[in-house]
Image: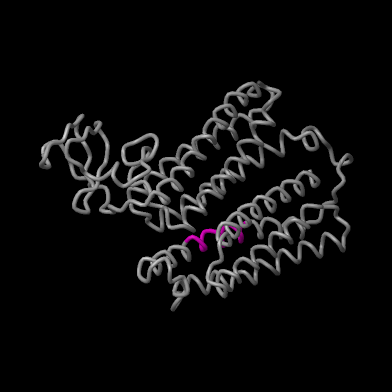
Amino acid sequence: MKKRLPLFVKLSLISVYVIFLAGSVVRMTGSGMGCPDWPKCFGYFIPPTSEEQITWQPNTDYKKGVIIIKDETLYVAQKDVKTYLTFAANNWAKYTKHSYATFNKYHTWTEYINRLASAVAGVFFLFLILSSLKYWKENKEITILAWLAFILMLVEAWLGKIVVDSNLKPTIITIHMVGGLIIIALLLRLRFITSNKSFGANKEDSTYRYNSLFSNLLIISAVFSLIQIAMGTQVRQFIDEQVKLFGFENKNYSLLNPNFKFYFHRSFTIAIVLINLGLFYLNQLKNLGYKLVNWVVFLLFLETITGILMYYAEFPMGTQATHLLAGAVLFGLQFYLWLQSRKVKA
């Protein structure tokens, strides 16, 4: 299992990005409350597919813990229940964590797939920490990083529950998002340590050159991307509120009278573009050899285009998911480039 650690690092990293993608689809489609409870969905391990399954019906068997909707209110079965012609309130308890009582099978299954992606990631992380234990005597940093990433994944799972219980509280969503980016940074550090190109390499073997300005701009660009993504979740919350107000079909009203956070998010893009173009210019001018900078510029272009399309073309399908995923990958590349730069300096 020790030799497979690099593979588990890659799989864990990919799985986190898949969660980012799935989560962005959830928000894009307004499916955040598709499952009113956590970790189950309406009390089921496999979500319901029709409204009849979660609507109170006479002469029907319900298992303990199943959630139903009756009179626009959520109720939880306190025991295995066989219903009769009238509703027996003593067999049910109102779901008190929130009052959201709507069923949409598409939203439910979109949210369920997001949770399924998290469960698969959990399996990869379990293999990751088990394989990292083999390195404890050889390189303690590997084991510590793996366990930190695993613990943060558990915290992220708990935050996912809080997000649902709080009916998508914006602050919790932002913390949830930033936590995911920190996990990505930990995994990239692990990837850097365990990769064939960097593990045990020295300065003479490197194809890169060190430049202090380039290295400083890299860490600034990564921090700026982190701020921008966090601010983006706040902008997305404003859009969600507009959707609730005007309806999902009236996307042209999504950015009606935008708040300060939107203008900050949009204007801050200028600073991010300038810094990353500066990285590209320095890499070319000084012949530093960092090929990943080209991907940074591409992702920056993709981020800008999708942002423009969302604002001027009323959120075309897929642009929100692409926008968020590109931002998360951009942050990862910037951080990994900084690790490469530090290695050259050492």
Q: Is residue 225 magenta?
A: yes
Using the rendered image of the protein, determine whether residue 156 is visible from the camera's viewpoint.
Answer: no
Say whether residue 137 is left or right of residue 211.
left
Q: Count the labels in the image.
A: 0
Examine the residues drawn in magenta and state their main secondary structure. helix
Report the residue at 68% width, 31% height from top.
Answer: 7
Using the rendered image of the protein, determine whether residue 114 is visible from the camera's viewpoint.
Answer: yes
Report the residue at 57% width, 59% height from top.
Answer: 318
Return the x and y of residue 57 as percentages of the image width and height.
20, 42
Which one is in front, 143 or 101?
101
- Is residue 338 shown above or below 244? above
Splitting the image into 4 quarters, where does residue 146 fall? top right
Report the residue at 70% width, 47% height from top.
Answer: 336
Return the x and y of residue 296 as percentages of the image width and height.
72, 58
Splitting the image into 4 quarters, where does residue 121 fall? top right
The residue at the far bottom in this view is: 257
Which one is in front, 310 or 333?
310
- Is residue 201 shown above or below 69? above
Q: Quadrant of the N terminus?
A: top right
Q: Quadrant of the C terminus?
A: top right
Tell me where the magenta segment starts and ends, as one range: 223-233
- Is residue 15 shown above or below 298? above
Return the x and y of residue 126 as percentages of the image width and height.
54, 28
- The colour scheme of the drawn protein is one colour
Report the residue at 41% width, 51% height from top.
Answer: 107
Splitting the image into 4 quarters, where does residue 3 fall? top right
- Is residue 337 shown above or below 64? below
Return the x and y of residue 315 as percentages of the image width and height.
54, 67
Q: Is residue 313 magenta?
A: no
Say whether residue 124 is left or right of residue 168.
right
